[in-house]
Amino acid sequence: MPPKSVVSALQPLQPENFTTAHHIGNPPTGFRNPWPSYNTSGFVGALRTRFSTPKNFVPVPLIRAGLVQVRKPDFGEQKDGLKATWIGHASFLVETSRQDGADRGACILIDPVWSNRVGPYGEPKTRIPT
């Protein structure tokens, strides 16, 4: 007869003074902001903020001195080592070393957003086309 295994549950990891006072319902179905500085402005307030808040975009300088140097990428030309190419914003192409007998290593594209819009509700288009 095989030996019996016993699995016991671990205690939940919660910080000291943990409270669920900000949860709504039992079981929780919502959240209430507990901070005294928070005030609800409602749907109209959200629209007002969305369309009337000034956009403080930083202008692109006319002189490129001080900006990151733009270089022509050399995808796949480096034979050994790990190489990361910054494509823009949060996008990177990571290339790994090639194994013996292989033409190239693995290419991994890391990009959280690869479209013209970030959200599903008609957010503004990105400033640089994809």
Image (cartoon, grey):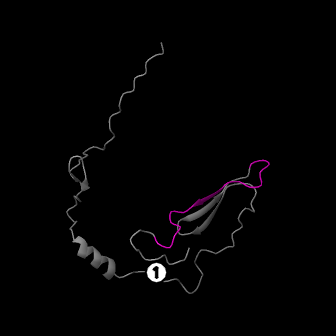
- The secondary element bearing badge 1 is classed as loop
- The quadrant the C terminus occupies is bottom right
Amino acid type indicated by mark 1: Val
Compared to residue 21, the image places residue 13 above or below, namely above
Left or right of residue 16: residue 69 = right
Residue 64 falls in image quadrant: bottom right
Position of residue 12 measured from the top left corner of the image (x, y, whole percent): 32, 38
* Residue placed under numbered mark 1 in the picture: 58
Residue at the far top in the pictured view: 1
Compared to residue 54, the image places residue 92 above or below, namely above
Residue 121 falls in image quadrant: bottom left
Position of residue 25 measured from the top left corner of the image (x, y, whole percent): 20, 50
Please give the name of the residue rendered at 26% of the width and 46% of the height, measured from the top-left corner. 18
Position of residue 4 measured from the top left corner of the image (x, y, whole percent): 43, 18
Q: Residues within 10 Å of mark 1 (few under 14, many from 20)?
A: few
Magenta span of residues: 99-117
Left or right of residue 22: residue 129 = right
Left or right of residue 30: residue 112 = right
Residue at the far bottom in the pictured view: 62
Q: Nearer the viewer, residue 51 or 84?
A: 51
Please give the name of the residue rendered at 74% of the width and 48% of the height, measured from the top-left corner. 99
Position of residue 115 measured from the top left corner of the image (x, y, whole percent): 51, 70
Compared to residue 65, the image places residue 43 above or below, namely above
Q: Nearer the viewer, residue 95 or 68?
A: 95
